[in-house]
Image (cartoon, helix red, strand yellow):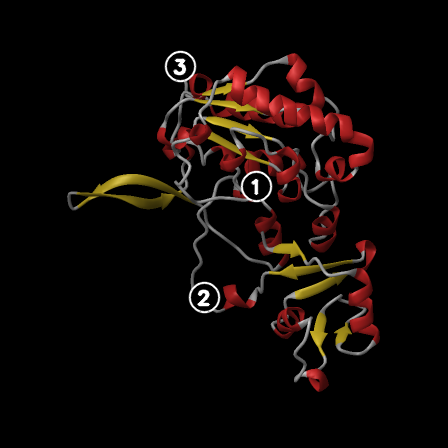
């Protein structure tokens, strides 16, 4: 992601600003380290280093400090290649658009050149996409009782998990359902499990027999889990209001929340054995996320 939240205590941050160690540009939100404090070495040294690289911004509306990927890195390059899927649905697209970046899309296809098979780039052509018989490969858990926990629109979202007091019974039920999915529904071995949720909820939802199959929600570009056939996607993805504010994205308006959620989910699912063209079983308790996956499958299904 081009920006992430910096977990600094609000009291500490305000003291750094009030004490003059950190200089806050009230208009832009940019944070810099006071040159007169250049010899500082203490508890906030890491925070100081981020300030010195012009990577921090304060979002007043949400009282949040964000670490931003420095655009200067792109300016230092003649050409930048980004290997991804559904690019226009991602926050990176909005980040680059904010900086006025233009781009061209290419298709990456396995081809033969001088007798050697290798991936080659061609001007983007949807017909060059690898098309699978998705309906025969992706088997979504259709258990009404197990999916009941994710029926509300915002169930399993970040805010839903944070509000543990109100949703405690549902969170307990989610853990039991996940255990039931692996143990009884798909009868998975521990080394065949792959699951994810927000990192803050990993310990809350992990269970016997599948806990070691946890993979970070944002994991991409790895084949390390391509032998896993049983997947649990225990989240409901939305772009955060802080990011929407940073990139001037009116939530639910110009930024497509559903496309963003679909992109993130599909890229995670593709860490599993389906990347090898093998069938998978998947538990997606969020009704919103499940419907988005079903819609994506219908739109990208291999023609009969």
At numbered mark 3, what does the secondary structure look like: helix, strand or loop?
A: loop
Give me the disc on residue 304. 3
Mark 1: few/some/many CA within 10 Å (<14, 14-19, 20+): some
At numbered mark 1, what does the secondary structure look like: helix, strand or loop?
A: loop
- Of residues 39 and 291, the one nearer the viewer is 39
Work out whether 98 lies above or below 215.
below
Q: Residue at x 65, y 27 (%)?
A: 175
Give me the disc on residue 89. none
Instruction: Answer left or right for 148 relative to 130.
Output: right
For marks 1 and 2, the one nearer the N-term is 2
Residue annotated with mark 2: 77
| Contact, mark 1 vs mark 3 (Cβ under 8 Å) | no
At numbered mark 2, what does the secondary structure look like: helix, strand or loop?
A: loop
Residue annotated with mark 1: 217
Q: CA distance from mark 1 to mark 3?
A: 33 Å
Residue 11, position as x, y percentages in the image = 82, 64
Q: Is residue 222 visible?
A: yes
């Amino acid at each position: 992601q081009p920006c992430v939240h910096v977990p600094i205590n609000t009291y500490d941050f305000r003291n750094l600003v009030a004490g003059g160690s950190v200089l806050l540009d009230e208009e832009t939100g940019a944070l810099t380290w006071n040159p007169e404090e250049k010899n500082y070495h203490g508890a906030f040294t890491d925070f100081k280093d981020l300030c010195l690289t012009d990577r921090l911004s304060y979002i007043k509306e949400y009282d949040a400090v964000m670490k931003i990927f420095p655009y200067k890195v792109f300016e230092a390059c003649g050409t930048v290649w980004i290997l991804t899927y559904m690019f226009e649905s991602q926050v990176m697209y909005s980040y680059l658009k904010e900086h006025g970046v233009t781009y061209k899309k290419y298709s990456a296809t396995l081809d033969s050149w001088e007798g050697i098979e290798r991936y080659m780039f061609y001007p983007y052509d949807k017909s060059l996409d690898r098309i699978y018989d998705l309906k025969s490969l992706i088997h979504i858990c259709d258990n009404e009782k197990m999916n009941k926990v994710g029926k509300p629109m915002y169930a399993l979202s970040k805010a839903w998990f944070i509000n543990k007091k109100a949703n405690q019974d549902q969170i307990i039920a989610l853990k039991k359902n996940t255990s039931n999915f692996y143990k009884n529904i798909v009868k998975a071995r521990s080394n065949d499990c792959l699951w994810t949720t927000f990192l803050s909820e990993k310990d809350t939802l992990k269970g016997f027999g599948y806990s070691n199959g946890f993979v970070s929600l944002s994991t991409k570009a790895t084949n390390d889990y391509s032998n896993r056939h049983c997947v649990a996607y225990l989240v409901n993805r939305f772009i955060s209001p802080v990011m929407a504010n940073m990139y001037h994205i009116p939530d639910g308006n110009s930024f497509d929340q559903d496309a963003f959620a679909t992109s993130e989910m599909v890229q995670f699912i593709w860490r599993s054995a389906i990347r090898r063209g093998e069938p998978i079983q998947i538990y997606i308790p969020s009704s919103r996320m499940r419907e988005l996956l079903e819609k994506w499958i219908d739109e990208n299904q291999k023609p009969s």
